[in-house]
Image: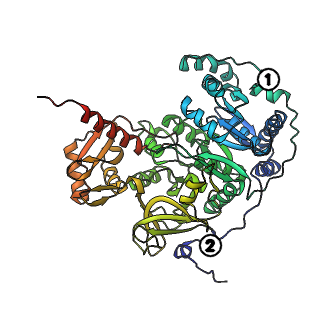
Amino acid sequence: MTQKFERPWHRHYPEEIPATLEYDKKALPLYLNEATERYPEKKALHFMGKELTYQEVFEETKKFAAYLQNLGLEKGDRIAIMLPNSPQSVIAYYGALMAGGIVVQTNPLYMERELEYQMNDSGAKIIICLDILYPKVSNVKGNTDLEHVIITGIKDYLPFPKNRIYPFIQKRQYKLVVKPEQTQDTHLWDHIMDVSDGIVQHVEINPEEDLALLQYTGGTTGYPKGVMLTHMNLVANTQMSMKWLYKCKQGEEIVLGVLPFFHVYGMTAVMNLSIMMGSKMVLLPKFDAGEVLKTIDKQKTTLFPGAPTIYIALLNHPSLKKYDLSSIEACISGSAPLPIEVQERFERITGGKLVEGYGLTETSPVTHSNFVWDRRINGSIGVPWPDTDAKILSIESEEEADYDEIGEIAVKGPQIMKGYWGRIEETEQVLDQKGWFRTGDLGYMNEEGYFYVVDRKKDMIIAGGFNIYPREVEEVLYEHEAVQEAVVVGVPDPYRGETVKAFIVKREDSSVTEEELDAFCRKHMAAYKVPRVYEFRMELPKTAVGKILRRTLIEEEKNKQTSASKEPIQP
């Protein structure tokens, strides 16, 4: 049977990846049920020395779901989860969905103002948080619709004697001792697991219509928006992931969970994928390069979804050569562009495959990726996933652009969000009646159907009438042996309108000057693209998932300009 190629990228698909899939029309918690039936005694979670089987995770998930229902949770109520990667973050997620709730993933690093905003915007009634975060939650609770706070701690799932020692470590590290008590509106995790009968009242879920998640966008510009993702959005994207990783075996993979689950990428590529495949998840509550290297070496993890800054930190760790990373089979990098040099060096060291993917919070998140074991093109984000259509909209005409013409990337598929929570006008600006979502990213497609991201529409620098795409400049900077991290922004310039500024983090034990970088860049790109200003830093501002906050740097530059303009002119 000859496959019909609707779009040029389909001809590159290997036999193992069909262009279209049959998706399960199921609610997400059913995958935990099924994994438990298939692998009841198999280890589902590893956390700082503690391991839980699928049966144990399932039983505790039912207890949590039943307790929520006994608190009065009704279908569609929002439940905020403010936790790092831990057994509780998995159990609370599937328990909330099992009870009929909508999960609101909340960054544990949020300050009170950010937390209060998200609780009010989502209308969450219940929040689960770490004990060390309880004072923060308590301070904002009265200004929100929160009715109940559920409190847990890292020690709750540590093996003996770590569970006894950890409170002392916590006291020293955070200079904080929190001893909440069980009350009518404050609930302790241990108490829930002791008293809940685990009898969950069935809630009818329509996977295609009912929301599973309110995932807030990063908020690098303006206020974060709640992205409405249905059960089907998340199921579809996870099943696409399984097909893309076709060499991975059901029930056999060991997945490294260092990407935070409160970010949609970690949630899909680690948590949901692991549960759907019956894999073992190795959870790390925060990123520490040394700890990640030790964990890979000891746990023999096979799948390692990550972000460029994570791989860069590992490659530059002084003890890298002490660890065996050869268990790694596949990594899909997301959240930011993957420098080619980082990709090639990581593959040499591990023997596994590292490819760049692309997606957004609004797309659950993945829409494109290079093939892991088949044809790929360095520098490209690859091709659209099964059942995912994509096109480039011409900046001038809004029509579909020609091959190699730069325009805005638009995507369509079963993983595309339902819209922004409570924001009809903003939804209509990016999502049309036919289901096409405008990403706000600039890119192009070549004749073979491979896509390239040039930059965010808002990040493009216009200097002296020339369009300059920061990613292109950053790629050159990453090629310099002394550069560990680089990000490029446009800063005001009285003559050119804008000019290019590069922020650089040097590799340890490396030395490079502004003049040397300037000479290097001039050898590799047109003069108008070369940074005019360099700033060396010890570190760059990042999101929890490791994405460099370009907008933060731009705001810093604007504030500098404003302050300078207010200074009195010296006589």
**Mark 2 element type:** loop
Marks 1/2: CA distance? 57 Å
Residue 488 versus residue 441 in the image, above or below: above
* Contact check, label 1 and label 2, Cβ < 8 Å: no
Location of mark 1 (residue): 184
**Mark 1 element type:** loop
Q: How is the rendered protein coloured? A: rainbow
Q: How many marks?
A: 2
Identify which residue, 115 or 156, lies in the foreground.
115
In which quadrant will I find the C terminus? top left
Give me the residue at 63% from left, 48% from top. Answer: 422
Q: The residue under label 1 is which amino acid type?
A: Gln
Give me the residue at 81% from left, 45% from top. Answer: 40
In which quadrant will I find the N terminus? bottom right
Q: Which mark is residue 15?
A: 2
Identify which residue, 554 or 175, lies in the foreground.
554
Furthest toward the left, the residue is: 571
